[in-house]
Amino acid sequence: MRTSKLKFVIIWIFMLLGCFIYGQNNESSTKLLKNNKSYFALNLSYSNDYVFMGRKDSITAPYLYFITKYQHKSGFYVDGSVSYLTKPEESRVDLFLFDLGYNFTINKFSGDFSATKYFFNEESYNVLSEVDINIAAIASYDFNVINFMVAASTYFGENSDADFFLSTEISHDFLTTNGKFQFSPTAGVYFGTQNFYESYYIYNRYGNGERPKSDSGSGSGSGSGSGSGSGSGSGSGSGTGTGSTEGSATEFEDTSQVVTELVIDESEKFNLMAFEISLPMWYIHKSFAISFIPSLVFPFNEATIVVDDTIVEEDLKETFYWMIGCRYKFN
């Protein structure tokens, strides 16, 4: 599995470099102009699942996002969003988010600094549901042939140590001659720690401190007995797929036992977490924009989860997910 992932990554990089060479020779490929005026924007987006650093819950989390943003011409901005979980049996407002930041552009160099506050619903099974605050810094440079971006961020949670993440992305912009349609093949590599993931397992995945009891005494399910667990041991289910109950998991008894200790061995290790490829595209007409972002993520360094005396080697799978949205900007 790991070998096939690396082969795919190498193939994609060569394909991306080929696109860059073609784009460099295409004289009609130009950058979109940035708006240097203050504006207010409304955004409505839908995502078929929530994935963070290649990690997700065994149950899909489709969200409808309502976002408002005010960008001042000085570079300061503020935005807020409401995330509505659309899964029929789980429909609810799952997250409120407030963001304050500053961005700037100097010639071909761009930067962004932001602080984000999360307010998750108590019932949320989002993998970030135990995170409270995020502080991030992003820097990017346009080399004409490619755009290079590096981002560093810190996530704080009430019930866990802080997490540190570092990510890099390369992309190239292709535009139509009128500049209204653009798509940008992108490849990203993501590194970080997994304290947030350990906290998610302790306070969310196993919720009230209970877990299903396996007949074989090893492995772990998702707490529902439906075979949708994330481990790869004898209690494994459908991994981190779509949350289907048709996995080949070991049958669980109806009884449960109390979890007294849960540890993820990799939680404080700074490791490669995921490689992701995406193809963001959007169409802009005056103040109106439509976007579509399909993504394929390959997780690395799966967690070793120790629950009491049980050791489970997590078996994460690659995930395809997408987001579609529309935005209207008031200048």
Image (spheres, rainbow, N blue to C red):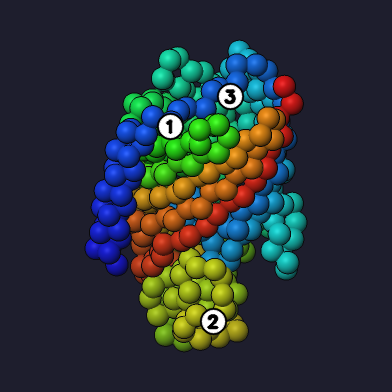
289 and 52: which one is in front?
A: 289
Asked if disc 1 and disc 2 are in contact, CB closer than 8 Å, the reply is no
Could you tell me which secondary element the residue under label 3 belongs to?
strand
Could you tell me which secondary element the residue under label 2 belongs to?
loop
What type is the residue that disc 1 sits on? Answer: Ser
19 and 193: which one is in front?
A: 19
User: Which quadrant holds residue 131?
Assistant: top right
Could you tell me which secondary element the residue under label 1 belongs to?
loop
Of the image marks 2 and 3, the number of the one nearer the N terminus: 3
From the image, tell me which residue sits under label 2: 246
What type is the residue that disc 3 sits on? Answer: Gly
Measured in 3D between alpha carbons, the distance from the residue under mark 2 to the one under mark 3, in whole angstroms, is: 44 Å
Q: Which one is in front in this view, the residue at disc 1 or the one at disc 2?
A: 1
Measured in 3D between alpha carbons, the distance from the residue under mark 1 to the one under mark 2, in whole angstroms, is: 47 Å
Would you say 118 lies left or right of 266 here? Answer: right
From the image, tell me which residue sits under label 3: 101
Q: Residue at x 65, y 38 (%)?
A: 289
Would you say 302 lies left or right of 87 here? Answer: left
Q: Which one is in front in this view, the residue at disc 1 or the one at disc 3?
A: 1
Of the image marks 1 and 2, the number of the one nearer the N terminus: 1
Q: Residue at x 63, y 31 (%)?
A: 99
Query: Dividing the image into 4 quarters, which one contains the C terminus?
Result: top right
Measured in 3D between alpha carbons, the distance from the residue under mark 1 to the one under mark 3, in whole angstroms, is: 30 Å
Q: Residue at x 58, y 24 (%)?
A: 101
Residue 175 pos. (x, y %): 48, 36
Q: Is residue 197 shown above or below 80?
A: below
Residue 198 pos. (x, y %): 47, 54
From the image, tell me which residue sits under label 1: 29
Crowding around mark 3 (Cα neighbors within 10 Å: few <14, some 14 to 19, many 20+) is some
